Amino acid sequence: MNNSLASVGYRTYYVWLRNAVSYRRFILPTFIASIGEPLLYLVAIGIGLGSYLGAIDGMPYLTFIAPGLVVSAVMFTSAFECTYSSMVRMTIEKVYNAQLATPVSAEEIVAGEILWGMTRGAVSGIIMLIMLAIFGLAHSPWIAAYPILWIAVGFLFSSLSMVITSFARNFDFFTYYFQLFISPMFFFSGIFFPLDRFPPAVKTISLFLPLTYAVDASRALMQGNMGWQLMIDTLALLIPGFILFVYALHRMKKRIIK
């Protein structure tokens, strides 16, 4: 696996650039989709349900869930880009085969895909943050540090999703990933309710979910609560993200080069 990491070079940028140029055709529909879902959660749950729940941890419910929605948007976009979209490029469009005919290595293809997943995740994070600003929820000056958090979240979930893609033989395989892991994590990582109100078993499980640490870090930035816990949360994303990145290089190279 060390050899896989050493094979990642500057040509990774060209893989990323190819995806960016291709993405220009879909900017408008993806932009509308990126706005629609966050707006639905903010209005239907944050405002609608929040009017019945009242304050959570001393803050309005909409303010409580907003930080988690920012990082969950990054997670969903990165995960989708490095599963379904990567599978399309690999199996239907045969983009990987064409890239292998150039000096680009298999590892650089995978790294470029992960970098693109991180980029798409960051774009969703920006859109979500703009929505929060419109609702008057982005007050803390520490939200300027959000790009670092988006990089960490996008890196982890893009790498994890590429590992999943390396095992997928068809698109149906991704249903298990999203329905059994991504979606449950969305509801049990402290976005909508404080973790200390969950049953002990659920709270213990949540400690092994990466989104839990992303939500905690996002809430700290939005509330301006800076401390050691924020660094711990960030490391809890970056360390497993790096491990998954190296493994994704190894697994996807075996998948691409048969």
Image (spheres, rainbow, N blue to C red):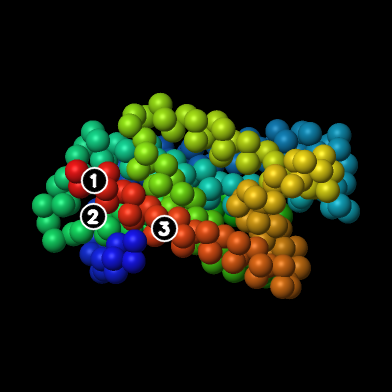
Which type of secondary structure does the marked residue at label 3 adopt? helix
Q: Amino acid at mark 3?
A: Phe
Outermost residue toward the top in this view: 172
Asked which quadrant contains residue 170, the reply is: top left
Which type of secondary structure does the marked residue at label 2 adopt? helix
Judging by the rendered image, the residue that carries numbered circle 1 is 256
Q: Amino acid at mark 2?
A: Ala
CA neighbours of label 3 inside 10 A, class few (<14), some (14 to 19), many (20+): many
Report the Cα–Cα distance between label 3 and label 2.
Answer: 14 Å
Residue at the spot x=42%, y=42% of the render? 164
- The quarter of the rendered structure image containing the N terminus is bottom left
Residue 202 placement (x, y as % from top left): 75, 41
Judging by the rendered image, the residue that carries numbered circle 2 is 106
Residue 236 placement (x, y as % from top left): 60, 62
CB of mark 1 within 8 Å of CB of mark 2? yes
Outermost residue toward the bottom in this view: 227
